């Protein structure tokens, strides 16, 4: 084949369509039983009476790709890759694939938050609850609690309530070295202010606007935040309470909850027991880049993009010959951004690896990524636009420096 894509999520699917429409032979490998990636679990209201149905989007993209002759290798795991003789060799559970160019679009992985009792049946990541509910149509339980307050937990909690599942409340993580800001009420409150525009209540949206503009208002808003929490989607948001333990004999039966000081210390004698039969842990998302580590491509840590990401340029090419990346493995953003990045990657592959004339269409595709980022309903981390801009400037500076060194006389 000409191009192998690892990952059949929004980025991988859109890239495959772009390439196959130009006559390129494309194969797509994914370890999940069906194409779609994180699209498969998504169902949310973008605007009033306007819904984003990830499963329908995944089906549409898959049908487009198949109609263009893209070959899918589903339920296949990748365990090694090498580059020699101007081709990539990717070793999988279904044999070895060879391709001139390789696109890694492996998406993201969920972070967990440590809490005593988290190995009990009935404890799961919030993404697992989303897949159970939206993909397999199985209820994770009757009444649950969510550990972790972030964009991901709020989005999926809304989906769970639409399925008739009772969520008792959102809670902060207990103090732990691995929890970091997830157990800091002040840091969490600051993060919630960045999402205030998504609040269902006009009062909450207005309050968030004023609090973001004034440190004095922000200070008093935090001090006066109700100890019983404020409700979002009729779910109490407990910024000043944490789950200290998940309890039960052979399955989840209850959680122990304690109040917190402003700095995240547990208040003595504040424990209470709350009956639940499942707990969702929402520690956020990190770029999934284990396969990048099998290549010579460097990685670097960028907080605003969710963790370690591969060195890459805005056109999704990397410093490694015929190696490209796209989607959440390059930083945590929305599925629409990932899809747009896939289009960019497809056009970059056509330009750099197959010498197609793509300058204008590649520039327009990169512009579309910036527009999708700017208009994204959810921003998983504060400062994503600025972080992207600075990252790509840094990459271009590296590229120019290397070029100047090569041009120096010996």
Image (cartoon, helix red, strand yellow):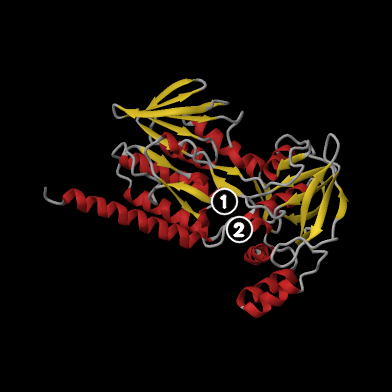
Which residue is most to the left? Answer: 410
Answer above or below: position of 180 versus 207: above
Q: Residue furthest front?
A: 268
| Circle 2 crowding by C-alpha within 10 Å: few under 14, some 14–19, many from 20 | some
At x 63%, y 77%, the residue is: 215
Residue closer to the observer: 10 or 273: 273
Q: Tell me what residue is drawn at x 71 percent, y 56 percent.
A: 49
Indicate the quadrant where residue 258 lies: bottom right
Q: Which mark is residue 64?
A: none
In this picture, is 335 found above or below 233?
above
Q: Secondary structure at mark 2?
A: loop
- Residue 343 seen in the figure: yes
Q: Quadrant of the N terminus?
A: top left
Residue 279 vs residue 316, the one in the foreground: 279
Q: Which residue is mark 1?
A: 334
Image quadrant in which you'd find residue 25: top left
**27 or 274: nearer the viewer:** 274
Q: Tell me the distance, in whole angstroms, between the alpha carbons under discs 2 and 1.
A: 8 Å
CB under 8 Å between callouts 2 and 1? yes
Query: Percent position (x, y) of residue 38?
Result: 61, 41
Image coordinates of residue 324 in percent, x first then y, are 40, 41
Residue shown at 73%/34% (left/top)?
A: 136
Q: Is residue 50 left or right of residue 99?
A: right
**In the image, is 174 to the left or to the right of 65?**
right
User: What percent of the width, then of the height, locates residue 111?
Assistant: 62, 46
Q: Circle 2 sits on which residue? A: 377
Q: Residue at x 34, y 40 (%)?
A: 320
Label 1: state its secondary structure. loop
């Amino acid at each position: 084949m000409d191009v192998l894509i690892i990952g059949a999520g929004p980025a991988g699917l859109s890239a495959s369509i772009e390439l196959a429409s130009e006559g390129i032979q494309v194969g797509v490998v994914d370890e999940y039983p069906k194409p779609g990636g994180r699209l498969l679990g998504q169902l949310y209201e973008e605007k009033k009476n306007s819904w984003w149905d990830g499963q329908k989007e995944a089906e549409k993209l898959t049908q487009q790709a198949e109609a263009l002759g893209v070959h899918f290798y589903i339920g296949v795991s990748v365990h090694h890759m090498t580059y020699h003789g101007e081709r990539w060799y990717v070793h999988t559970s279904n044999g070895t694939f060879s391709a001139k160019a390789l696109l890694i679009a492996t998406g993201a992985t969920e972070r967990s938050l440590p809490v005593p009792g988290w190995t009990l049946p009935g404890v799961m990541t919030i993404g697992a609850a989303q897949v159970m509910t939206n993909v397999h149509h199985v209820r994770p339980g009757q009444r649950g609690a969510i550990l972790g307050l972030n964009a991901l937990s709020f989005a999926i909690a809304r989906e769970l309530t639409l399925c008739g599942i009772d969520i008792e409340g959102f809670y902060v993580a207990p103090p732990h070295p691995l929890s970091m800001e997830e157990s800091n009420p002040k840091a969490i409150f600051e993060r919630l202010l960045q999402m205030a525009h998504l609040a269902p209540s006009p009062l909450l949206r207005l309050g968030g606007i004023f609090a973001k503009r004034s440190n004095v208002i922000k200070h008093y808003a935090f001090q006066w935040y109700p100890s019983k929490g404020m409700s979002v989607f009729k779910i109490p948001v407990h910024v000043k309470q944490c789950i200290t333990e998940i309890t039960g004999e052979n399955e989840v039966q209850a959680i122990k909850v304690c109040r917190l000081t402003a700095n995240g210390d547990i208040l003595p004698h504040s424990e209470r027991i709350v009956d639940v039969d499942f707990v969702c842990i929402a520690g956020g998302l990190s770029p999934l880049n284990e396969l990048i580590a099998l290549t010579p491509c460097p990685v670097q840590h960028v907080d605003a993009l969710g963790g370690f990401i591969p060195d890459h340029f805005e056109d999704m090419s990397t410093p490694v010959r015929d190696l490209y990346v796209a989607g959440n493995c390059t930083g945590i953003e929305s599925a629409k951004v990932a899809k747009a990045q896939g289009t960019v990657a497809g056009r970059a592959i056509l330009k750099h690896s197959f010498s197609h004339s793509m300058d204008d269409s590649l520039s327009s595709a990169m512009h579309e990524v910036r527009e999708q980022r700017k208009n994204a309903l959810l921003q998983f981390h504060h400062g994503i636009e600025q972080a992207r801009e600075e990252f790509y400037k840094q990459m271009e500076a590296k590229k120019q420096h290397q070029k100047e060194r090569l041009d120096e006389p010996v």
